[in-house]
Image (tube, rainbow, N blue to C red):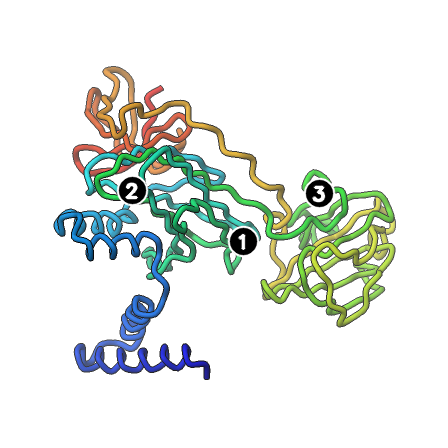
């Protein structure tokens, strides 16, 4: 066992023993989670925000009470139940009280998509960390990605079909920061038909087949006969066959994602079983073999991981750049007034059809935190966060 692994294992044993002695008859799952959290704090590299906090504590440059509020603001940020859809852009004005220095962005990241989170800051210091949302609604103990010192960008690909995520943003205490955050996704896989994109998909997952007796378990991508078919990812050829509904077929196994890709109706097959291939290698060509012999040439592309699932998110084009907000908070976190007339609602999402949290009172004062599209993210005097549109 490597030395680092031995040290980690010994630390875990010591912590488990200490917790057992301290807590007595606690349940084993809670015991393990507590031990895991402590081990991560001891041996896992710190994020840029944690390093910054540690440095401030050592230097004593900021009052301990302020740092405590700053850390509590980060801890409490994910209690905001605001949700956005991707792609998303939001401009935050983080120059208010330390208690509101941290803000959260919740969203769902579809499987097969690579998330990119980028930030632009006019001045000051800002930190960004990405967390998974667990089944119980809490965020994971440690971030899956975080901005590094001087680099406000990272990519992240989910391990499963989709993941609920929280991106936490925080400014340094006592600094004014205008931070523009953009969240976009791109396909994790290369498009399987050379020279084509999602516009060539003409038949989708779930479409009726055999007069309604079965459903389509893939996407049909139409292209001229003989068009090259490409390996969508690095992997190993598991099967090359000819016969049945698929005609000439190829199965490609993706070790990284632990799933297989099914290419059917080929005209030519250029690979053999057990061959290792790289992303972009030519596997064969488009045809209309099997039960596609009466249809125009196309590739039936399927994805299997414990069963078939919809490949469309893996094939969809990269997200366009999210639009710039229509408004700006010109003086940082500014006090806004709900208009005198009309009905205006505090919503969970920045969308006119978003879940209504409550109807705001006319002329009610709210604090503007950020802007996205035509919506403001606001904090009410009751302590509620939400999105509101005053158009």
Q: Nearer the viewer, residue 269 or 115?
A: 115
List x then y, in percent, for residue 359: 26, 29
Question: How packed is label 1: few (under 14 Cα within 10 Å), some, or many (20 or more)?
Answer: some
Among the two numbered marks 3 and 1 on one chain, the one whose residue lies closer to the N terminus: 1
**SS of the residue under disc 3:** strand
Residue 13's quadrant in the figure?
Answer: bottom left
Q: Nearer the viewer, mark 2 or mark 1?
A: 2
Which residue is labeled 2 in the image?
171
Residue in the image at 24% along x and 82% along y: 17
Q: Which residue is mark 3?
A: 201
Please state if 372 lies on the left or on the right of 24 as rendered: right
Q: Is residue 157 above or below residue 172?
A: below
What is the crowding at mark 3: few (fewer than 14 residues within 10 Å), some, or many (at least 20)?
many
Helix, strand, or loop for circle 2? strand
Q: Are marks 3 and 1 in contact (CB under 8 Å)?
A: no
Tag 1 secondary structure? loop
Q: CA distance from mark 2 to mark 3?
A: 44 Å
Q: Which residue is mark 1?
A: 111
């Amino acid at each position: 066992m490597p030395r680092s692994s031995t040290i980690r294992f010994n630390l875990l044993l010591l912590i488990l023993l200490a917790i057992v002695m301290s807590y007595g008859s606690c349940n084993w799952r809670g015991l393990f989670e507590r031990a895991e959290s402590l081990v991560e704090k001891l041996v896992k590299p710190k994020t840029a925000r944690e390093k910054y906090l540690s440095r401030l504590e050592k230097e004593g440059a900021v009052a301990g009470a302020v740092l405590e509020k700053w850390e509590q603001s980060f801890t409490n940020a994910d209690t905001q139940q605001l949700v956005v859809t991707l792609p998303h852009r939001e401009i935050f004005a983080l120059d208010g009280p330390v208690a509101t220095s941290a803000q959260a962005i919740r969203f769902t990241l579809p499987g097969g998509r690579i998330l990119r989170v980028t930030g632009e800051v006019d001045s000051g210091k800002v930190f960004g960390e990405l967390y998974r949302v667990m089944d119980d609604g809490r965020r994971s103990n440690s971030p899956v990605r975080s901005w590094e010192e001087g680099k406000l960008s990272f990519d992240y690909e989910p391990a499963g079909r989709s993941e609920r995520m929280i991106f936490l943003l925080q400014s340094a205490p006592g600094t004014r920061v205008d931070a523009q955050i953009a969240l976009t996704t791109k396909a994790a896989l290369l498009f399987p038909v050379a020279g084509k994109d999602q516009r060539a998909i003409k038949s989708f997952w779930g479409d009726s087949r055999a007069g309604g007796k079965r459903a389509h378990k893939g996407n049909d991508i139409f292209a001229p006969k003989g068009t090259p078919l490409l390996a969508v990812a690095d992997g190993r050829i598991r099967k090359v066959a000819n016969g049945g509904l698929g005609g000439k077929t190829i199965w490609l196994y993706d070790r990284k994602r632990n799933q297989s890709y099914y290419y059917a109706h080929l005209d030519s097959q250029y690979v053999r079983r057990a061959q290792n291939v790289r992303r972009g290698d030519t596997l064969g060509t488009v045809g209309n073999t099997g039960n596609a012999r009466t249809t125009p040439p196309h590739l039936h592309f399927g994805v299997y991981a414990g069963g078939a699932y919809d490949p469309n998110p893996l094939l969809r084009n990269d997200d366009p750049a999210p639009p710039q907000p229509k408004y700006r908070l010109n003086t940082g976190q500014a006090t806004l007034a709900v208009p005198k007339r009309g009905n205006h609602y505090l919503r969970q999402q920045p969308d006119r059809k978003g879940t209504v949290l409550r109807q705001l009172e006319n002329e009610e004062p709210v604090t503007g935190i950020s802007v996205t599209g035509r919506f403001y993210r606001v904090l009410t005097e009751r302590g509620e966060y939400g999105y509101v549109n005053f158009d």
